[in-house]
Amino acid sequence: MTIGTNANLEEKVKYFPFEVDFEQVLEALEKLDAWEDNGYAESPNELKGIIEDHYTEVADFEAEIKRLNDENADFEMKVFNLEAKVSDLEGEVADLKIELKEQL
């Protein structure tokens, strides 16, 4: 009895070990080596954890960006108020200059 040509390596090893093709074993090992060489040696669960950590980091960055944007808006409002105050003071100075000229 044979399992057929569509069986993957795991199926062959599990159900029909006498039909294991060592070329297929070598190919699987090469894929694992490439996986590790490319820095993806983590298991799927480890990758899931890494992805979740990245989502957490992104959420933290988004919160920090929002905080900084709010802080920036506060500073812009303060600058606006200070510019208005400067304008008012310039008007007062101009009025005082006119008043001083009139007194002389």
Image (cartoon, helix red, strand yellow):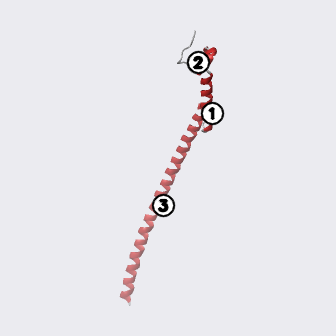
Whichever of labels 3 and 1 marks the residue nearer the N terminus, that label is 1
Q: Residue at 43% across / 71% down in the picture?
A: 86
Under mark 1, the amino acid is Asp
**Which residue in the protein does label 2 denote?**
11
Indicate whether 103 appears above or below 67.
below
Outermost residue toward the bottom? Answer: 104
Nearer to us of marks 1 and 2 is 1
Foreground residue, 35 or 87?
Answer: 35
Q: Residue at 46% across / 57% down in the picture?
A: 73
**Which residue in the protein does label 3 denote?**
75
Nearer to us of marks 3 and 1 is 1
Q: Residues within 10 Å of mark 3 (few under 14, many from 20)?
A: few
Whichever of labels 3 and 2 marks the residue nearer the N terminus, that label is 2
Whichever of labels 1 and 2 marks the residue nearer the N terminus, that label is 2
Foreground residue, 9 or 78?
Answer: 9
Under mark 2, the amino acid is Glu
Q: Quadrant of the N terminus?
A: top right
Circle 2 — which element?
A: helix
Indicate whether 97 appears above or below 86.
below
Under mark 3, the amino acid is Phe
In the rendering, at what x and y percent does residue 40 appear? 60, 36
Circle 1 — which element?
A: helix
Q: Residue at 41% across / 75% down in the picture?
A: 90
Indicate whether 79 appears above or below 65.
below
Choose top left, top right, bottom left or bottom right for residue 96. Answer: bottom left
Kindly report the distance in space between the C-alpha atoms of the residues bearing marks 1 and 2.
Answer: 21 Å
**Which residue in the protein does label 1 denote?**
33
Q: Quadrant of the C terminus?
A: bottom left
In the rendering, at what x and y percent does residue 102 appear? 35, 87
Give residue 24's mark. none
